[in-house]
Image (spheres, helix red, strand yellow):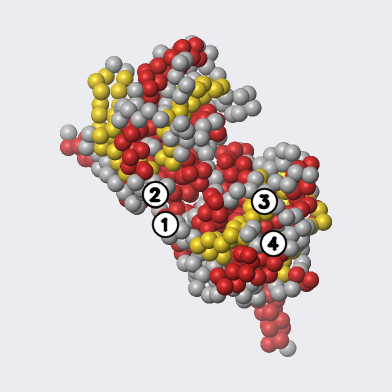
Amino acid sequence: MQQPNVSIIIPTYNRAHLIRETLDSVWGQLYKNWECIIVDDGSTDSTSEIVKPYLEDLRFKYYERPLNRHKGANACRNYGIEISKGEFLQFLDSDDILSPDKIKHQIELIINNGDADLVFCQWKRFQNDIEESQSIVPSDFYTNYNSGIDFLESLGENNSFMCSHSYLMNKNILNKSGYWNEYLESNQDGEFFFRVLINSKKIIFCPDVTVFYRVSVINSVSSYSSAEKVRQVIASWQLMENQLILKYGDKLYQYIENGKKRVFIDLNKSRYLKIKFENRDFFKYQLIQEKRYLKSKRFHRRLIKKIYNLFNKNDSRS
Amino acid sequence: MIPEVSVIIPVFNRENLIIETLKSVKNQIFSNWECCIVDDGSTDNSIKNIQSFIQRDERFKLIRRSLESKKGAASCRNIGLQNTSAKFIQFLDSDDIISENKIRNQLNLLKESDEFSISTCVWGRFGKGLPDNLFLKQSSYSNYTNSEDFLNSLKGSKGYFPPHAYLMQRKLIEKVGPWNENLSLNDDGEFMMRIIANTTEIKCALESIAWYRLPEKNNLSNYGNIEAVNSAILSWKLVDNSLKIRFKKKRIEYVEWAKGRLFINVKKSFPELIEFHKPFFTEQIRHTRRQNSLYSRVIRKISQKF
C-alpha cells in the first residue's frame, strides 16, 4: 500500500496542562507516516518542556511563530502549512484527541477513492475523560457527499457543526480555498472549512473512527468580549453568506441561518445587544422570530392578568 | 535557470493588441521570467499571432483553458497560476503594457522586504486615439506599512491601481486564495482587496509605469448585463466583509467611498438592483436624498424669484 505523508498541524498557546494528551494521541496513531508540526504562539508556561521529550521522535517538530507574523492560532496554522511536507493535512488543537486508527482509516479511504478531496469522521465532546464523551450530531448526517454545498445544507438541516480535527484534507484544496484567515478571532475553523468545503467535490465519511473535542467546564474566553469582536463574527457570517449567494443564487441557506441564530442568541446575552439593530437586514429572520416571541409573551401576560383580575373581582364581590 | 517571475496573461480575441503586450514583456530589462498566456477560447487570429510571436523564445508558453474550467479571465489567471512556478507573480491583461524596467525595479524592492510585501508603480491610461495620460502625482505613490492608510490614499488617486501595476509573491496569493471565478465584474478589485488586506508592506516603484488601455467601447457597456452588475455589487459586499474582518471596524471608509461610484453606475443601468440591495446602499441613498432635497430647494427659490 502507498504511504502518503500526512502533516499534523497543532497551534498551541499555554496548554502545558493539556497538550500531553493531544501529543500522545498523535504518537499513538496506527498510521506511521506523518510529521507533527507544533507551532507555539508565544506560550509563557512550561509548554516547551512538556513538548521536549516528544521531539526525540523526529516526526515531531516544534516551532515558535515567527515574529513578523500576526499573533493568533490561525497565523500559527498558516506557518505550519507553509513548512509542511505532507500531501494531506490534519489540523488538531492542542487540547483535542484523535482515536488511534483515525488517520489510518481515513488514508485508506482516500487511496481507495483517488479523487476524494476531504474525508471526515464522527466527533464527540468530552470534558476530562473521553470514556464519557457524547455525540451531539444526528447520525443521519454521517454519510458521503458529492459536493460541499450538499454537505453544508445537510449540516444545516441537522442543526449541527463539525470540528476541524474530524477532517483529513488533500493539501491541493488550499489552492482553491486559500489559507486560514489570520485576522479572524472567532469562528476560525467554521470560516476556513466553509471555504474548503465549497471547493470540494467529493467528501467521504469514514466510519468506525472518532475524534474528541474538549469542552472546558468553565466557559472559556467568550467570543463577545468586545463590540469589535461581535462585528467581526457577523462580518464572517456575511462573507460566507455572500459567497454562497454568488455561487448558488439568492436563497435561504439553513446552515447560515443556524449560524446567525447562534450569534443572535449570544449577542442577546452580551453587553452589545444593540449591534443586532445595526445589522437588521442580516438578522432579518431572527428579529422577526424575536418579535413574534415577544408578542406572544405579552399576550400571555395580558391573558394571565385578565384571568387574575376576573378572579379578584369575583373575590371582592363575594 | 529557474525563472524568478511568472507573467500571467489571459487572452480572449485580442488579435490586434496582444502582440504589443507581449513585446512589452519581451523587452523587460530583467530577463529571467516565464510568461504563461492562457487562451479563453479565442475565435479570431489571436492564437496564430501569439504562436508566431513566441516561437524561438522558450520563456513564453501558450496554453488553452480546458473545457472543464469555467470561462472567463479570472479562471484563466488561476490556470496560469497552476501552470507556472516562479516565486514572484506579474498579472497582465492582453491589451496592457508595462515599462521595460517595471519587473526589475519592483523585484529589487520586494527582495529587500518580507515575503508578504507587494509593490505598486506609476500608471496611466492610453489608447482610443487619445494622448497618453500618465498620472504623475498621486498620493498613493508612496510606501505603506499599513494597508488601511494605503486604501485611504486610493480615494484621492483614481480609486485603484490596475492589477498589472502590482508585483507580488506567490506565497501571498496562496494565503489569500485564487481569483474568484464566479465574479463577472470587479473580479480584479475583489482579488486585490484580499491581497491588500493580507500584505505586510506596500512599496512603490516610482520610475516604472503600468499602462492601462482604455476600452474601445465605453466602460459603461460593462454595465449592460443585469447579472454582471449584480455580481459587481456582490463583489463589493465580499470586499466589505473581508475588510471589516481585517480591520475590525464598523464601517470601512474606502468601501463606502467606492460604493458611491458603484451606486451611480448601478442607478444608471439597473436601478431595480438598488432597491434589491437597499440595506447595502443605505449611506448612498441617504446621500442622494439629501442632495436632491437641497437641489430642489434651490430650484424652487430661483423659480420663485423670477
Q: What is the chain letter for disc 2?
A: B
Residue at 36 percent of width and 38 percent of height: B107
Q: Secondary structure at mark 1?
A: loop
Tag nearer the camera, 3 or 1: 3
The reply, left or right, for residue B26 in relation to residue A128 is left
**Looking at this view, is B77 or B222 the one in front?**
B77
Rounded to the nearest angstrom, the CA distance separating label 4 from label 1 is 29 Å
Q: Position of residue A309 (x, y in %)?
A: 67, 79
* First-in-chain label (3 vs 1): 3
Residue A181, horizontal then vertical, whole percent: 52, 52
Q: Height in image: B209 above or below A11?
A: above
Q: Chain of mark 3?
A: A
Q: CA distance from mark 3 to mark 1?
A: 27 Å
Say the numbered circle drawn on residue A26.
4
| Of residues A7 and B200, the one drawn nearer to the viewer in this rendering | A7
Residues under labels 2 and 1: Cα distance? 8 Å
Q: Residue furthest left?
A: B306
Q: CA distance from mark 2 to mark 4?
A: 34 Å
Q: Residue at x 29, y 16 (%)?
A: B129
Label 4 secondary element: helix
Residue behind mark 3: A6
Give the spatial CA distance, label 3 vs label 4: 11 Å
Q: Quadrant of the C terminus of chain B?
A: top left
C-alpha span from label 2 to label 3: 29 Å
Q: Which residue is mark 2?
A: B114
2 and 4 marks in contact (CB < 8 Å): no
Amino acid beneath label 2 = Asp
To which chain does the residue with label 1 belong? A
State if disc 1 and disc 4 touch (CB < 8 Å). Answer: no
Residue A68 bears which disc, if any? 1
Q: Tell me what residue is drawn at x 40 percent, y 21 percent.
A: B22
